Image (cartoon, grey):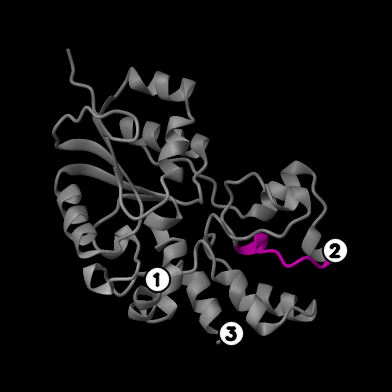
Amino acid sequence: MARKPKLAVWKFSSCDGCQLSLLDCEDELLALAGNIEIANFLEASREVIKGPYDLSLVEGSITTPHDLKRIQEVRKISKFLVTIGACATAGGIQALRNFQSVSDFISIVYATPEYISTLEQSTAISSHVKVDFELHGCPINKEQLVEVISAFLFHRKPNIPAHSVCMECKLAGNVCILVSNGVACLGPVTHAGCGALCPSYNRGCFGCYGAKENTNTSSLSNKLYQLGVKNQDIQKLFRSYNAYTPAFLKESKAHD
């Protein structure tokens, strides 16, 4: 009998939301369980089967020296490594500290700063080890996650749409809130995956899924200027869940 591929799920600096997306798969996860061995997933079970692992899913960013050492160990025992969520793919909301001195935050927040061991910046997993695929989102789309796992199980490329949230708005029959209502929205430059959740409720996209491929952030900024959005507010739009996504980072710095 052929050995089932081993799946491991790892947590670094994060809120656990992306791991919960995997647990929320329910029926899909049960179907996958027949084809894989969930060998290491502490969010779901205390039982740990030693590696090496065929596929590792990694949630969270690298923020401490311990994180840095541990991700290198995970990479060594993983045939394929996939990062899931904004923290793992772009440093997450905690990457906002990268724009200031982390020592200032530590001295304000903690009564005994000398006990805190941290890196100067919160960074994506790919900044430190080879990553085979990045699945964006805050949190990730569970259907996309199942597709990625299935793709690696059957040795094919994951079929994840590369279009923007604007396409999802069109599919949902939404009127463009940016053009029609003058609402500041990152939909034109944000990777699809949320189903246009916020625009469907007349709220601008916050960029939870990071920058789409070949995006034009400066063009969107010019449009926001025309709508009367202030320079500092445009910068804030690009500095949220995916502030250190390269395209968003470049655009936010253009508004310093």
Q: Residue at x 19, y 36 (%)?
A: 53
Residue 229 relative to residue 90: left or right? right
Residue 151, percent from left and from top: 38, 35
Residue 134, percent from left and from top: 39, 51
Looking at the rendered structure, the kind of residue marked 1 is Val
Residue 176, magenta (yes or no) = no
Residue 166, percent from left and from top: 69, 55
Looking at the rendered structure, the kind of residue marked 2 is Asn
Which disc number belongs to residue 255?
A: 3
Which disc number belongs to residue 21?
A: none
Q: Residue at x 83, y 53 (%)?
A: 175
Which disc number belongs to residue 181?
A: 2
Q: Residue at x 74, y 56 (%)?
A: 203
Q: Earlier in the sequence, mark 2 or mark 1?
A: 1
Q: Which residue is mark 1?
A: 109
Query: Residue lying furthest top in this view?
Result: 1
Rate crowding at label 3 as few (under 14), some (14 to 19) or many (20 or more) other CA atoms within 10 Å: some
**Magenta span:** 180-189
Location of residue 21 with respect to 202 vertically, above or below: above
Location of residue 23 with respect to 88 vertically, above or below: above
Residue 1 relative to residue 245: left or right? left
Secondary structure under tag 1 reads: helix
Instruction: Look at the image and tell me in which quarter the C terminus lies.
Output: bottom right
Q: Nearer the viewer, mark 2 or mark 1?
A: 1
Say which of 153 and 104 sits in front.
104
Q: Residue at x 20, y 42 (%)?
A: 79
Residue 188, magenta (yes or no) = yes
Location of residue 36 with respect to 161 vertically, above or below: above
Question: Marks 2/1: CA distance?
Answer: 40 Å
Question: Marks 1/3: CA distance?
Answer: 28 Å
